[in-house]
Amino acid sequence: MNRSLSVDILKIVLACLVVGIHSGFLEDFSALACYLTAGGLFRIAVPIFFVINGFYFFSVPQDRIATWFKRVLLLYLFWTLFYIGYWFRMETVNLFEIARVIKTLLVGHEHLWYLPAMIGAAAILLCVRKLSTPLLLAIALFLFAIGLSIQYLGNYHVFSGSWIDKALNVLWFYRNFLFFAFPFFAIGYLLRRTEIYKKINLSSLVVLVLLALLLLLLEVYCDFKLQPAPEGFDIFLFLILVCPLIFVLALKFEIKGDSKTLALYSTGIYFIHPLFISLITARVDLGGTLLTFVVIGLSSAASWLLIKINSRVKFIL
């Protein structure tokens, strides 16, 4: 199979950015620097992953779609069980705890939310994929706008002190399959359907990427300065522009190959890194920056072992 190794390299970079988000990259140097990077720029990682997923979902044959869903579901079940000690409490059994466990299984524990969100996004896309490109794009942008509005209204506490404010600040209310995953998944799908990315020359694309990144950083900086107390964002306005452009830029480099190893390393780093963060922070305070690099190193080493295991069991990466 002829793979795009440039996209696989991008995926490794994105996985490392996720580590930086969860480790608090630069928080030990400057609150602003941390917010601009881990709290802002690094937030391109997960949306780009969704764009990539949607792009390649287009090529899944009709008779293999059920297999695709089964594979993602098995991946989710494995890692949910792997982290069961972090989200399941044996000592407490009541209706509230049962509801919490059900919610965790449906939404996903911590970073595992990505998989049920991708399943939900793909399921929606299957229902609407025959729509025209302009209409499908309009739906994606509309849903993104809803998620963005919820995030901003919540973070700026426009309805401060009310139940509305509390609802708007519930993480899964906006960071979910509908308002977050689907818009980027659908854009990736449409990029493959229309092949519009082939019509953009490399020099123009580089300029667009740099401009979009600048706009994103400006948005992040304004949020840092304007919020009464800076809160984290998952959805920024300019992500909808930056993320597809960066993915297209990776496609333009056209580094081809047959090995899936790089892609498996990115998956391994993404799924295993919270384990190392929790083990290290429970024993020593390295500071967010050093912690980021240490966890990337340990996660990369662990991914080598996971790849070896995956060659036999086939459902952990």
Image: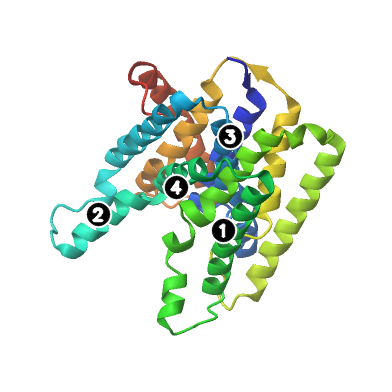
Q: Which three-letter amino acid code belongs to the residue tagged 1?
A: Leu
Give the residue type that dot 4 points to.
Ala
Contact between marks 3 and 4 (CB within 8 A): the answer is no
Q: Position of residue 30 (x, y in %)?
A: 62, 61
Circle nearer the viewer, 3 or 4? 4
CA distance for labels 3 and 1:
25 Å
Residue, disc 1: 143
Mark pair 2, 1: CA separation = 27 Å
Q: Which residue is mark 3?
A: 11
Residue designated by label 4 = 117
* Mark 4: secondary structure: helix
Which residue is pictured at 70% across the width and 30% down the height? 251
Disc 3 versus disc 2: distance between alpha carbons? 31 Å
Taking the image as shown, residue 158 lies to the left or right of residue 244, namely: left
Q: Which residue is mark 2?
A: 101
In front: mark 3 or mark 1?
Answer: 1
Cα–Cα gap, marks 4 and 2: 17 Å
Instruction: Indicate the amino acid at tag 2.
Output: Val
* Mark 1 vs mark 4: in front: 1
Please name which of the two marks, 4 or 2, marks the residue nearer to the observer.
4
Where is residue 90? Give x, y as percent.
15, 52
Residue 29 seen in this snapshot: no
Q: Are marks 1 and 4 in contact (CB under 8 Å)?
A: no
Question: What secondary structure is found at the residue carrying circle 1?
Answer: helix
**Nearer to us in this view, 99 or 288:** 99
Ranked by sequence position, the earlier of labels 3 and 2 is 3
Reading the chain from its start, which is encountered first: label 3 or label 1?
Answer: 3
Going by the image, does 83 lie left or right of 164?
left
Structural distance between the alpha carbons of marks 1 and 4: 14 Å
